[in-house]
Image (cartoon, helix red, strand yellow):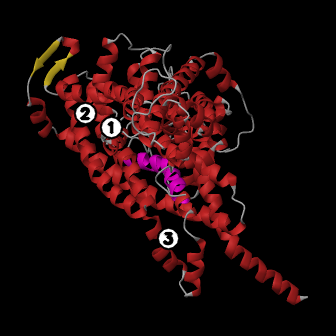
């Protein structure tokens, strides 16, 4: 009997040493990663009275008042729609223009490829602040200040390096024979790209599009500078400038934060594997 | 006779015949046109603006040559912003790298043991990465709130502090509060890349090392670390560039305050440009920032190239 107990105890200790410790660390890691977000979720359903007292950590009463306020009585919905428009158009432009360029860099015999890739990489390292004042003056000169076009175009250009980088490494992995076969059959390079490469390059395009979309959805400095009214503000700008009449409306901010985060967090969670593949494209041999 | 279809292929159908090379320039040109218009030209324009004394509000616009740069040299606030940026970058990047490595090793150990990869564990670290930076700043601003913030409450419950700390009002705390937020937001990114790197390390190497009697630390030191060096360098490069350019995270959390204690280079330049509307001097600050980042990136590109060549 005691032998059984002893075995049990030993087994438990062994299990705890091998798994339990890791599990403990993992739970703390999980709390570290998700805790702040969970707290924001809890905050968003607290009543105004509960917001200004702690404990309790878990509120006894919950309310949807904050969500109602940000969705029906603020310009957040407008900002969300602006963000969708900007992110979708920036993604489209970046993928089309970047895809053509990546295809060239991967397959066509042009001079100065390393220089071009270097330039692409250099652009991605630009500090946005270094271009913001002339860009602001340029957009104002073109009459595009405070328009979604200005924000979308800027996002597209600053996402181009990312798109080109990912797509170039992706196009390089596709078999070159397919391309040559299409060329021998009389396709132009553009047609070969459209009818032969695009169908099999869909996963790569999807990854690039996903990353560009997330970048554009989250971008703040350009959106803040190039917009000036509720009609054109994107979602992150709306969250940053959330209006408070007398005091900071923490509950409303929490609700707005979650609403704005949901699309990108959802995309990231769903396509997490692809995102990692995209981020590591060319940098980690798989 | 087979013809290499590379240059000047004959079209059976006729039409305009373009060589492969011409096609290449044609297809790549929209990208370079856009980058030129919206990225390269503004850099040149910023340089030009930086040689001016320009205050649109007062209708002032005069060429002053290098005067702004002379002013920059004597500008204490600029040097303070440099120090703040350096401090922020050094601390946050090293913490991110260490923490990211820890997380990656943890998740790797978890996945290699059981077989099935725990999706939820990877989702868990991808969430902070995907969250808009502005949102993460708001999340942490609420956690740091002195009276009802969770952080003070937990620290008080754990009897680590007697009085609530006003994290965002005390200059000694604020920069560290910003660093903690940045580490939370970006350590997962480091972990993701490092985890992908760890997956490429052949497991046989560890088995062989164990047979030879190598302990966990020795395995890490002599197998994991050298093989992962290229990824570490890449994480270091990306994270450093981002930390040096940091704007939205700190701007939304602290606005550069209290005083100017958390004012990074980007925030100082932004305030000069769009709050005091000094387009000339603001562009000088922005150009200085560009030069610093350009110097850093060329240094890093050299490093990166060496490591990528070794890795290839």
Q: CA distance from mark 2 to mark 1?
A: 8 Å
Q: Mark 1 sits on what residue?
A: A127
Q: Mark 1: few, some, or many residues within 10 Å (few <14, many ≥20)?
A: many
Q: Mark 3: few, some, or many residues within 10 Å (few <14, many ≥20)?
A: some
Q: Quadrant of the C terminus of chain A?
A: bottom right
Which residue is farthest front? B1
Magenta stretch holds residue B299:
no
Q: Residue at x 32, y 23 (%)?
A: A135
Q: Residue at x 33, y 13 (%)?
A: A140
Secondary element type, mark 1: loop
Q: Residue at x 67, y 45 (%)?
A: A57
Q: Mark 3 sits on what residue?
A: B224
Q: CA distance from mark 3 to mark 2?
A: 40 Å
Which residue is farthest right? A1
**Please, is residue A4 above or below residue B34 in the view?**
below
- Give the letter of the chain under mark 1: A
Q: Position of residue B38 (x, y in %)?
A: 34, 25
Q: Are marks 3 and 1 in contact (CB under 8 Å)?
A: no
Secondary element type, mark 2: helix
Q: Mark 2 sits on what residue?
A: B286
Q: Are marks 2 and 1 in contact (CB under 8 Å)?
A: yes
């Amino acid at each position: 009997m005691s032998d059984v107990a002893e075995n049990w105890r030993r087994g438990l200790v062994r299990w705890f040493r091998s798994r339990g410790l890791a599990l403990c660390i993992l739970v703390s890691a999980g709390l570290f990663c998700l805790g702040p977000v969970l707290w924001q979720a809890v905050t968003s359903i607290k009543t105004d009275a509960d917001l200004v007292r702690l404990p309790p950590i878990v509120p006894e009463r919950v309310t949807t008042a904050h969500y109602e306020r940000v969705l029906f009585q603020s310009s957040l919905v407008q900002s969300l729609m602006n963000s969708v428009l900007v992110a979708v158009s920036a993604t489209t432009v970046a993928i089309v223009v970047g895809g053509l360029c990546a295809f060239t860099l991967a397959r066509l015999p042009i001079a100065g490829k390393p220089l071009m890739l270097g330039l692409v990489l250099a652009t991605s390292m630009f500090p946005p602040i270094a271009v913001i004042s002339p860009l602001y003056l340029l957009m104002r000169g073109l009459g595009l200040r405070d328009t979604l076009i200005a924000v979308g175009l800027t996002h597209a250009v600053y996402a181009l390096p990312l798109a080109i980088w990912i797509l170039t490494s992706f196009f390089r992995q596709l078999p070159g024979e397919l391309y040559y076969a299409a060329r021998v059959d009389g396709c132009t390079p553009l047609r070969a790209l459209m009818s032969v490469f695009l169908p099999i390059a869909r996963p790569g395009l999807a990854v690039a599009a996903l990353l560009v979309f997330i970048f554009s959805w989250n971008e703040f400095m350009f959106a803040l500078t190039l917009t000036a009214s509720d009609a054109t503000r994107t979602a992150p700008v709306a969250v940053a400038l959330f209006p408070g009449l007398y005091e900071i409306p923490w509950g409303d901010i929490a609700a707005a934060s979650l609403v704005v985060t949901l699309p990108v967090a959802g995309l990231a969670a769903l396509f997490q594997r692809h995102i990692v593949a995209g981020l590591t494209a060319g940098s980690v041999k798989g | 006779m087979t013809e290499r279809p590379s240059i000047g292929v004959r079209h059976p159908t006729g039409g305009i015949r373009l060589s492969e090379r011409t096609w290449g320039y044609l297809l790549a040109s929209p990208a370079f046109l856009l980058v030129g218009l919206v990225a390269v030209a503004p850099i040149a324009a910023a340089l030009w603006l930086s040689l001016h004394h320009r205050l649109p509000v007062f209708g002032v616009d005069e060429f002053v040559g290098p005067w702004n740069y002379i002013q920059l040299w004597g500008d204490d606030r600029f040097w303070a912003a440099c120090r703040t940026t350096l401090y922020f970058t050094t601390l946050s990047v090293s913490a991110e790298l260490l923490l990211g490595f820890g997380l990656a090793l943890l998740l790797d150990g978890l996945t290699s043991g059981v077989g099935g990869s725990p999706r939820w564990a990877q989702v868990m670290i991808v969430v902070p990465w995907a969250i808009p930076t502005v949102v993460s700043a708001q999340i942490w601003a609420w956690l740091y709130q002195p009276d009802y913030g969770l952080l003070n409450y937990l620290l008080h419950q754990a009897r680590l502090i007697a009085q609530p700390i006003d994290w965002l009002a005390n200059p000694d705390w604020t920069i560290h509060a910003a660093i903690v937020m940045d580490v939370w937001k970006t350590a997962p990114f480091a972990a993701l890349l490092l985890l992908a790197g760890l997956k490429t390390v052949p497991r046989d190497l560890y088995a062989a090392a164990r047979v030879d009697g190598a302990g966990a630390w020795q395995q890490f030191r002599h197998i994991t670390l050298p093989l992962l060096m290229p990824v570490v360098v890449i994480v270091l490069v990306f994270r450093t560039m981002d930390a040096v350019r940091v704007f939205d995270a700190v701007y939304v959390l602290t606005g550069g305050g209290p005083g100017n204690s958390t004012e990074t280079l980007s925030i100082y330049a932004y305030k000069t440009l769009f709050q005091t509307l000094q387009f000339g001097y603001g562009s000088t600050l922005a150009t200085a920032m560009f030069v610093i980042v350009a110097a850093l990136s060329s240094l890093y590109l050299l490093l990166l190239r060496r490591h990528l060549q070794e890795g290839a």
